[in-house]
Image (cartoon, coloured by chain):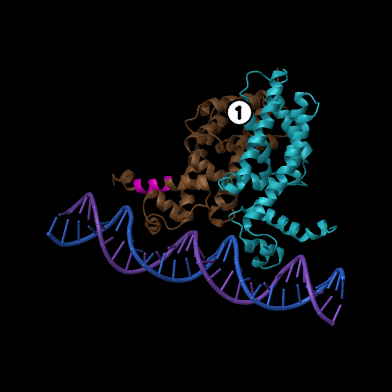
Chain colours: A brown, B cyan, C blue, D purple
Amino acid sequence: MTEQTQTSTRRDELLAIAAELFATKGFKNTTVRDIADAAGILSGSLYHHFDSKESMVDEILSSFQTELFGKYAEILAGTDDPRAKLEAAVRVSFETIDQHNHEVAIFQNEAAYLGTFERFAYLADRNQQSRDVWMTLLTEGVSSGALRQDLDIELVYRFIRDTVWVAVSWYRPGAKLSHHDIANQYLTILLDGITSP
Amino acid sequence: MTEQTQTSTRRDELLAIAAELFATKGFKNTTVRDIADAAGILSGSLYHHFDSKESMVDEILSSFQTELFGKYAEILAGTDDPRAKLEAAVRVSFETIDQHNHEVAIFQNEAAYLGTFERFAYLADRNQQSRDVWMTLLTEGVSSGALRQDLDIELVYRFIRDTVWVAVSWYRPGAKLSHHDIANQYLTILLDGITSP
DNA sequence: CAACAAACCAAACACTTGCTTGGTAGGCTA
DNA sequence: TAGCCTACCAAGCAAGTGTTTGGTTTGTTG
């Protein structure tokens, strides 16, 4: 009863190993033997912990998404003004890239492929949910006068989403620039542009 | 001797079919049988035209890159002012996404994985070359006073690169917004930001 | 010490994968 | 008509794949 953290330790270790490999080599390019090798066991032994390779990605992705969307919900429910909310959402995103690097990478690279399976239909739902979050923030921003009126909000949403999440392909935790630095620079560009005032 | 275009027709057809599948499902997820099925032949028959599955991506990627970097070189060698050059490079990129959708998608999704093979070492070179192009444009932009001085150019380069190329994941040729429209909106955001003046 | 469960091994199975081989249909040319 | 070439088929192989099964080790608990 008090052994929850102890009991799940080995499972979590294996999931972390799998996540790193999935993120680095891709889901299809990673074999169960790769995972087992990295863990120092035989491939068959993985099936004592998980019932399929798919279950592993599933668990990795779903738990990560639950956490992320919890944070978005907090921001939306908050009392900040529209611009502050938008900034907060951007900062949370870069923070997530820092703290859940592998998970974000897997989602970014494999969502399109995995989404074709019934089992991963929730990925499309999350995608829609994410769109709702950003569109709400942008719409509030425009109607409050904080953002320009001549923008195609749909396009702006896509640009933000892409730029933010794609950073996972080059950002490495612990590098010279922290995720705070990157978020600041990005917000500067996004909000004020790169031309000299 | 005069049959070059005729002779290569079937080859090109098969390459186009392969490109679409590679772009949609991923390189590793696409089997030679998938390609053959889509072409209406048997998988073994592909090897009359190509000597391996790798050769197919190789040919697809290398010919596309040659074309793209030719256009970048033209812009760099031109006499436009820094800001106009930067705009031109952005426009050419979105135009490429429109005209070589599959090729861009393959490069975007598979470069990291393919780059681990010697055969595809040139992908890393092209990447470096691309960086040189954008960094040159940005540096000229800053020193000419057209762009702000307080920017981390390296970061700006990454944001531009990511935002531009990642658009391939949602842009579909023939959609409501043309690649011209998208380039215009993007340049507006990039140059002037999204906050109201 | 007996009982038990978690973690793992050893070996295999069924299937998929890229690719090879020897042959054939049909059109073009000398 | 004979020869040749392009495009393809039919069948299969060897390696790699995810997964299953029955048994073994190791530590814990009553």
Main secondary structure of the magenta stretch: helix
Instruction: Indicate the quadrant where residue B134 lies.
Output: top right
Left/right of residue A99 with respect to residue B112 in the rendered view: left
| Image: A88 above or below B174 | above
- What x and y, as percent, mark residue B153? 63, 25
Is A15 part of what is drawn in magenta? yes
Which residue is disc 1 drawn over? Answer: B155
* Res B196 seen here: no
* Residue situated in front as seen by the camera: B159 or A71: B159
- What x and y, as percent, mark residue B154? 61, 27
Q: Quadrant of the C terminus of chain B?
A: top right
Instruction: Indicate the quadrant where residue B147 lies.
Output: top right
* Residue situated in front as seen by the camera: B42 or A96: B42
Dot 1 crowding, Cα within 10 Å, few <14, some 14–19, many 20+: some
What kind of residue is marked 1? Leu
Left/right of residue B63 with respect to residue B25 in the rendered view: right
Bounds of the magenta segment: A8-16
Residue at 35% x, 45% y: name it: A9
- What x and y, as percent, mark residue B139? 68, 23
Is B169 part of what is drawn in magenta? no
- What x and y, as percent, mark residue D17? 49, 59
* Residue situated in front as seen by the camera: C24 or A151: C24
